[in-house]
Amino acid sequence: MTVEATKKKFTFPSAFTILFLLLVVIAAATWIVPAGSYDYDENGAPIPGTYHAVDPNPQKLLASALKGPINGMYGIQGEDGSVDVWNSGELFGAIDVAMFVLIIGGFLGVTMKTGAINAGIAWVVVTLKGKEKWMFPILMTIFAIGGTSYGMAEETLAFYALIITVMLAAGYDGLSAGALILLGAGIGVIGSTVNPFATGIASGFAGSTISEGLIGRLVILIVGAVIGIIFVVRYAERVKKDPTKSLIYDQKEANEKQFLSGGGSDFGEFTGRHKVILFLFFLAFVVMVYGVIPWEDLGLPIPTWWWWFPEMTSNFLFFGILIGIIGRLPEKELVSTFVDGARDMLGVALIIGLARGITVVMNNGLITDTVLYWAEQAVAGLSSVAFIIVTYLLYLPLSFLIPSSSGLATVSMPIMAPLGQFAGVHSYLIVTAYQTANGLVNLVTPTSAVVMGGLAIARVGYGVWLRFVWPLLVMLMVLTILVLAAGVLI
């Protein structure tokens, strides 16, 4: 009698599980790590050299684990009534950020429901038929704009069938089409300028604004997009001239049979109403950026609105309703679509609360400043340039460990932003280091539904994708490091 052993394949835990386990570990650490505190200036920033020991305040493991996500929303620990005093002594939970994420979800849901984004991109594809070479710079730029503005990711999956069909008919391969979409949107996320899910959340917890560091992020976006376009076009043209140069040449007949016989996807006519909706869609982000820039502090005679999360949330709520009305969505459909869009972001909102709960437990256990002090001692000999480079490199493995970009920003910024101040590095550069590293990892991480789903549709193996994309990843890393170093020196 033989017994066949079944090997269970390891699956990486979800962000919820990782953060929950980390919450328990941090609560346990409050019983071991010495309690301590810095003196803080009037802006809530820790003053170097003022760290001192204080009486310990260990946290209960079960209470911290169960109440952590809830108290993270409100910024309190709960049982003992202690308050998260980070951020200038003010009560600072994650509820405003979570509400912002939910409303953004509704805004995006309504916009997608009108069909304007899909119809617009499909119109570009049809218009360029016969001039497919120009699809690469034009469509990659469009996807990059989506990535940099609202973190376009899952939405790209709808375009694979259409674009792959057109590209195969033009003599390119599925890898060229898949790279166009995945790298276009991905490089946009790396160079997130006003992306509320990366730059916005991280800036909020780092104590900076979404407008700070905008120039550096624009440089990464523009130069990175140019590098990406050249990289993809060179490969695509090489394949068109000699199909045997394709990394998936062995699948050529099977791919053509699957896609060219299917007719692609139909996204409908691109109407004048769609154009108005797209204008309003991007206007919402322009208004947000204007609202958060402190024009008075810059010495410019322009009205300053002093916006932050409550105002930004209201802004997207307004534009979401306006787009739904112009898109002629019936009242019930508009409301249900908005709610469904918010529901899609519920996981992100809960992750933010859970991650913020970790910070609350650390603060109330009085070990945040101790960890900060240890980190200060560890980087004491590093220059500002070396510090920002090390920070960027540190965020690469952290992005694998905590796959949620929102969760990573929430849990790490309360430590990394003050640490940057000790090293003479502005908090907005820490935000840029985080988002660029996280965006880079999200181009190749096997736990990403966007990466694995897109590759599956394009019929590109994961190993082939790594072989194709690694030179570009190196170039994007070098670009980011140069921009971060320049940001410190300027």
Image (tube, rainbow, N blue to C red):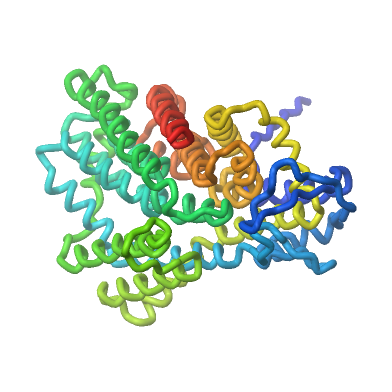
Whether residue 272 sits left or right of residue 92 in the image: it is: left
Q: Quadrant of residue 68?
A: bottom right
Q: Work out whether residue 288 or residue 381 is closer to the camera in this orientation and state it.
A: 381
Q: Is residue 430 above or below residue 201?
A: above
Please name the residue shown 38% across and 81% down the image. Answer: 332
Report the side of 89 relative to 179 (left or right): right
Residue, far bottom: 331
Residue at 36%, 53% (x, y): give it. Answer: 149
Where is residue 1? Give x, y as percent: 78, 26
Tell me the quarter of the picture where residue 61 sits.
Answer: bottom right
User: In the drawing, does residue 122 fall left or right of residue 407?
Assistant: left
Q: Residue at x 31, y 32 (%)?
A: 228
Please state the horizontal and vertical placement of residue 154, each as a whole percent of the image.
41, 50
Q: Is residue 396 visible?
A: no
Which is more toward the observer, 444 or 262?
444
Q: Position of residue 483 (x, y in %)?
A: 41, 33
